[in-house]
Image (spheres, rainbow, N blue to C red):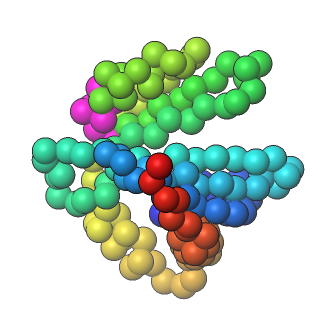
Amino acid sequence: MYLGWLASRLNWEPTAMIATGGDYNLRHVHFTGANGRAIEVELAAIPMADWGEIPGDLVGLRLTSTDNNANCCTILCSEAMGCMRMEAGGSAQACRMEQVSALSDQKAEFLLGQQLQRWGQDVLYEESLAVAAAIINTEKVQAAA
């Protein structure tokens, strides 16, 4: 849903999702941006001893650019442990400029429940959900090498 929201706000059109599996159950989602630029997103499921209350919660997010002149990298974490995991994995060290922001932990079902109690149509939610569904519909399973 978060990727659906981000893609809907940036007018990215999903073109393919390739499941490559492995220890992190990797998926590579390909988009075309409004300017025709190719965008690739990697989704990784991090194996954890304690899944917390909701399996599938967003643990961390790293945004980077392939443009070497952009000199940017932003890391967002849902918990301190997620930030430490990204640091230990070398993700943060690969950034030229680093911004780590811990997000407050709130239950996804509580936040979603609050949003769904609103009266009227929620265009942002509908657009995000439509893109998330389009991403899922583009999935192709790549044979393991």
Would you identify the image quadrant in which residue 6 lies?
bottom right
Residue at the image position 67 percent from the left and 31 percent from the top: 65
Q: Is residue 132 visible?
A: no
Above or below for 126 versus 79 = below
Quarter-wise, where is residue 131 in the image?
bottom right
Q: List the single residue furthest toward the front.
A: 145
Q: Is residue 36 above or below residue 17?
A: above
Q: Position of residue 109 (x, y in %)?
A: 29, 68
Nearer-the-camera pick, 95 or 127: 95
Residue drawn at x 25%, y 59% as measured from the top left: 55
**Residue shown at the point (63%, 23%) measured from the top left:** 72
Depth check, front residue: 129 or 85: 85
Q: Magenta segment, which residues?
A: 78-84
What number of labels is visible? 0
Left or right: residue 144 versus residue 10 is: left
Residue 18 horizontal/vertical position (percent): 55, 58
Looking at the image, residue 12 lies above or below residue 43: below
Q: Position of residue 48 (x, y in %)?
A: 20, 44
Furthest-right residue in view? 35
**Residue placed at 54% from the left, 85% from the top?**
120
Q: Is residue 126 left or right of residue 44?
A: right
- Residue 23 magenta-drawn? no
Residue 79 belongs to the span the image colors magenta? yes
Q: Residue furthest bottom?
A: 120
- Left or right? Give the position of 24 relative to 118: left
Q: Is residue 59 visible?
A: yes
Magenta region's main secondary structure? Answer: helix
Residue 34 in the image: state x and y as whole percent.
82, 55
Is residue 59 toward the left or the right of residue 32 in the image?
Answer: left
Q: In front: 11, or 39?
A: 39
| Quarter occupied by residue 79 | top left
